[in-house]
Image (cartoon, coloured by chain):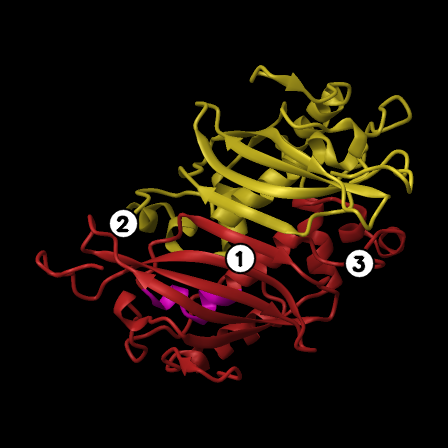
Chain colours: A red, B yellow
Amino acid sequence: MNRSGGETLPARNTSVNAARLTERTTGSREFRRCGLGADVAKLYFEDFAAGQVAEYGDMLVTAEDIKDFASQFDPQPMHLDEEAAKATIVGGLCASGWHTCAMMMRIIADGFLLNSSSMGSPGIDEIRWLAPVRPGDRLRVRSSIIETSEPRSRPDFGFVKTKFEVLNDAGTVVMHAITNLMLGRRTPRAANSVIA
Amino acid sequence: MNRSGGETLPARNTSVNAARLTERTTGSREFRRCGLGADVAKLYFEDFAAGQVAEYGDMLVTAEDIKDFASQFDPQPMHLDEEAAKATIVGGLCASGWHTCAMMMRIIADGFLLNSSSMGSPGIDEIRWLAPVRPGDRLRVRSSIIETSEPRSRPDFGFVKTKFEVLNDAGTVVMHAITNLMLGRRTPRAANSVIA
């Protein structure tokens, strides 16, 4: 599912993703492992390259989801209560920015990360919250790979610097985040290979 | 509650914070408004200045919390299951980095943000996940104000650039985040005042 032009990530796992995300949006809060069987080739560092673009999702955001997250983690009026939210700068109930981050994580986890050699991430270089996420929005994530790099000292993994954009169903980019993913190599780099 | 030396933020609301956070750590997931009555002076942009340091918290992290967040938002093995986590790079169950962000948000919300003229934030300049957050950790947040600035075009608020460090009870910084908070002014800036 690539609506963005440019080179694409391997699309072989998108039908699996669609199944998982449908499950997510039908209300189950329980994570159920499903579908990532032997028929879906696992992604390694070598499968990623600068310029690849892919899209993952969608995820429905409900008012209940927004309030539930906010009551645990970000109990500001604009995330908790429709009436109180009207008096705030955002003019109505909207998701906590951290909730949007968490939803992005779930979309990319289901989209490709759970089917990869991901070893996590040392952090995020930039997050921008660009537009409010409202009840009823359906979110998807566009990933654009900026660059890949291989640490000199570690032959077993590489970094994949990626810009993730979270879009709503109107096509508005509501958030972006730039991060370095750590992905294990399919084949360890030879000791004598040259790294730029 | 300032353990860090340096100038401090007004400490008048820390007893309220302690009460709220105790409530949070005794297991209630429900947000209950408490204590921010007329006796607690609200914080505005003018109350913040570069060099101020404050600490907020603490928040207990349980294995149940870690798995609950992960099952919704970040279902990777190191966040979901003790046994599976042993085989990962982090060597045992640990919180999703996004969960740590969300807990940081709750600590600073209770610490001062809910008692301020906060108007949100346009984003985050940097997040670094530096050490795993484990079951049983008690987290606190150290805030250090880097600089304040006033947008030329808006006399009603200012930006407070802040570094938030999340520490565990051993004093290890497990994460930091640098962000620009938007805070309303107590008194709108005069139209003829000079901004550097």
Say yes or no: labels 3 and 2 on the same chain.
Answer: no
Residue type beneath disc 3? Leu
Residue in view at x 85 percent, y 57 percent: A82
Residue type beneath disc 1? Phe
Spatial separation of the CA atoms under disc 3 and disc 1:
21 Å
Task: Residue A196: give x, y in percent of width and height.
Answer: 22, 59
The quadrant holding residue B181 is top right
Residue behind mark 2: B87
Identify the chain of the residue marked 2, using the numbered disc in the image: B
Could one spot residue A124 in this view of the protein?
yes
Q: Earlier in the sequence, mark 2 or mark 1?
A: 1
User: Is disc 2 placed on a helix, strand or loop?
Assistant: loop
The quadrant holding residue A93 is bottom right
User: Is disc 3 placed on a helix, strand or loop?
Assistant: loop
Q: Is residue A147 above or below residue B89?
A: below
Q: Is residue A66 above or below residue A18?
A: above
**Does the magenta stretch mainly form a helix, a strand or a loop?**
helix
Q: Is residue B179 above or below residue A78?
A: above
Foreground: disc 3 or disc 2: 3
Q: Which segment did they paint magenta?
A: A107-116
Could one spot residue A32 in this view of the protein?
no
Identify the chain of the residue marked 1, using the numbered disc in the image: B
**Front residue of B26 and A147:** A147
Task: Residue A18: give x, y in percent of width and height.
Answer: 50, 79
Q: What is the number of the mark on residue A46?
A: none
Residue behind mark 3: A93
**Front residue of A175 and A1:** A175
Say yes or no: labels 3 and 1 on the same chain.
Answer: no
Residue type beneath disc 2? Ala
**Front residue of A126 and A105:** A126
Count of marks overlaid on the render: 3
